[in-house]
Amino acid sequence: MNRKLTRLPAEFGPSVRFEVRPEPAAPFRATQETELERLKTRLLANTLADAAPDLNAALRCAANEAAALAWVTFCPLLVFPLLFEEKIEAALHRAKRQAHIYENSRELVAV
């Protein structure tokens, strides 16, 4: 252990003040996100109005997948409607196929 004590005098410089700039209300990407959510809600509401109630969860999942994929692109608002249509079509096809398999399996089990 060092037994020598070296005292250093405290020196304080002049007070420094910083200018605080106001931040913008919301960054551009944040406003884009809310627009994407509005578009998703509107398209999903139109689709759910025409679909059977048992497809509600599958269609919502498809809409969320489309929104997630669109969000990572350069222009999510332009890409989303087409992705939405593709995902909804795939979800409807999958639901139709599952219903067909379910009906066929019921016939096989009943025999």
Image (tube, rainbow, N blue to C red):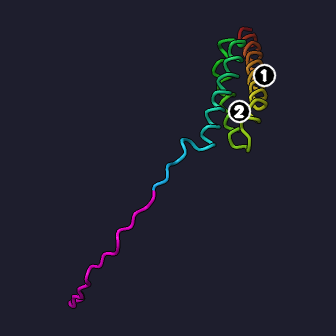
- Residue 81's place in the image compared with 71, above or below, is above
Determine the CA span between mark 1 and mark 2.
16 Å
Check the picture and name the quadrant holding the N terminus. bottom left
Q: What residue would you read off at disc 1?
A: 93
Question: Which residue shows up at 72% across the image and 35% down it?
Answer: 77
Q: What residue would you read off at disc 2?
A: 66
Question: Which residue shows up at 71% across the image and 18% down it?
Answer: 47
Which secondary structure lies at badge 1? helix
Q: Indicate yes or no whether the magenta region holds residue 28.
A: no
Q: Amino acid at mark 2?
A: Ala
Q: Indicate yes or no whether the magenta region holds residue 14.
A: yes
Q: Amino acid at mark 1?
A: His
Which residue is farthest bottom?
Answer: 4
Crowd rating for badge 1 (residues with CA inside 10 Å; few <14, some 14–19, many 20+): few
From the image, give the main secondary structure of the stretch colored magenta: loop
The quadrant holding residue 19 is: bottom left
Residue range corresponding to the magenta coloring: 1-19
Check the picture and name the quadrant holding the C terminus. top right
Question: Which residue shows up at 78% across the image and 22% down it?
Answer: 93
- In the rendered image, residue 66, in percent from the top left (x then y), is placed at 71, 33
Front position in the image: 99 or 103: 99
> Which label sits on residue 51?
none
- Is label 1 or label 2 in front? 2
